[in-house]
Image: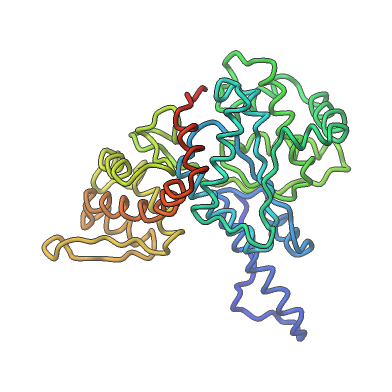
Amino acid sequence: METLSISSPDQAPSSDSSNSTSEEMRVTEKFSIVRSVGEECIHEDELLNLLSKKPEPVCYDGFEPSGRMHIAQGIMKIISVNKMTSAGCKVKIWIADLFAKMNNKMGGDLVKIKDVGNYMIEVWKAAGMNLQGGKVEFIWSSEEINSRESEYWRPLVMEIASRNTLSRIKRCAPIMGRSEDEELMASQILYPCMQCADIFFLKADICQMGMDQRKVNVLAREYCDLDKSKNKPVILSHHMLPGLKQGQEKMSKSDPSSSIFMDDKEEQVNLKIKKAYCPPMVVQGNPCLEYIEHIILPWFHEFKVERSADNGGEKTFESFEELVADYESGNLHPADVKAALSKALNKILQPVHDHFDNNPEARDLLTRVQGYKVTR
């Protein structure tokens, strides 16, 4: 990954102009915020240049409505979106209902898929996604594509398809949760071409998605090399939160015991975390510690562990490095980590529970979604 050297916000530049100083600091601060969203950035110099030249860059994010929302989709997306909008970006969230149908999610039933999409929007609103000022726009793929067909199919999807081999497109299969070696439906061959087209269709400057979507975002940059009229999007790929069981690199909706869902009640969260893989003094591959690093610390800016005086007393960690040092030394026990993690997660999820408990329409929507069978 590239490393870009930029001046610290508290270092005054050499220019005598106060306006120039203010502008440089503003761009530097925006870069720092936006860059913190991604585990990987392609490329940092392009991102800095974009932020210095465009006051309101368009950030493309998207999701396939495919079942109940887990905390990676819920809390981590809220953290990322709120960071992007605070730095002046406009975030277009692409509700990929048409794609979910093509990928046979929810049995390919578009009515159920739309219910799931609406449920997810309700969760984000309740949990704290900042929607003020019109900086976040939810766009349904089926409606937008149908209303602008002449801008989508021939000039974008078919062009991308005609410039790539079948083997290149199949390498993008992981974006659908598939393997490039498995037998794909014809619609699933078209899927990566369409997702690549979405980036240009929405006029995105930044693709902000998970590492599992990286291949199709790179495909978009490759297409730009062939079509010089297209502006290359900056890719910000965020970390993928693991499942709760040993060796699970990614949360799975089809295995409810491996994920914390945004509508899980307190007792469910407590039980799942209690059973989670969390070996003593082992940081690598420890999902409980990853949840603290990527959810609790960004949300609360601290992680508070409550213990008896005999067990070390109460301690508040303000950095992950501090937490790791105590955990690896054995000064912090897994049972104490789990108890504190459960408490913090339940505090984040409480507004979601309140919303679905107190809003009859939202409650009915959740009941329907919880009754749907998740299909791969």
The answer to which of 74 and 236 lies nearer the viewer is: 74
The answer to which of 278 and 10 lies nearer the viewer is: 278
The spot of residue 245 in percent (x, y) is 34, 34
- Which residue is at the far front? 360
> What's the colour scheme?
rainbow
Query: How many numbered marks appear?
Result: 0
The spot of residue 74 in percent (x, y) is 50, 46
The spot of residue 184 in percent (x, y) is 62, 16
Give me the residue at 86% from left, 36% from top. Answer: 151
Give me the residue at 14% from left, 60% from top. Answer: 311
For residue 142, side relative to residue 260 (left or right): right
- Which residue is at the far top? 183
As drawn, 342 above or below 201? below
As drawn, 279 above or below 55? above
Quarter of the image holding residue 112? top right
Give me the residue at 34% from left, 61% from top. Answer: 303
Give me the residue at 44% from left, 36% from top. Answer: 251
Quarter of the image holding residue 210? top right
The spot of residue 322 in percent (x, y) is 34, 62
For residue 200, side relative to residue 105 (left or right): right
As drawn, 184 above or below 321? above
As drawn, 136 above or below 154? below
- Which residue is at the far left? 310
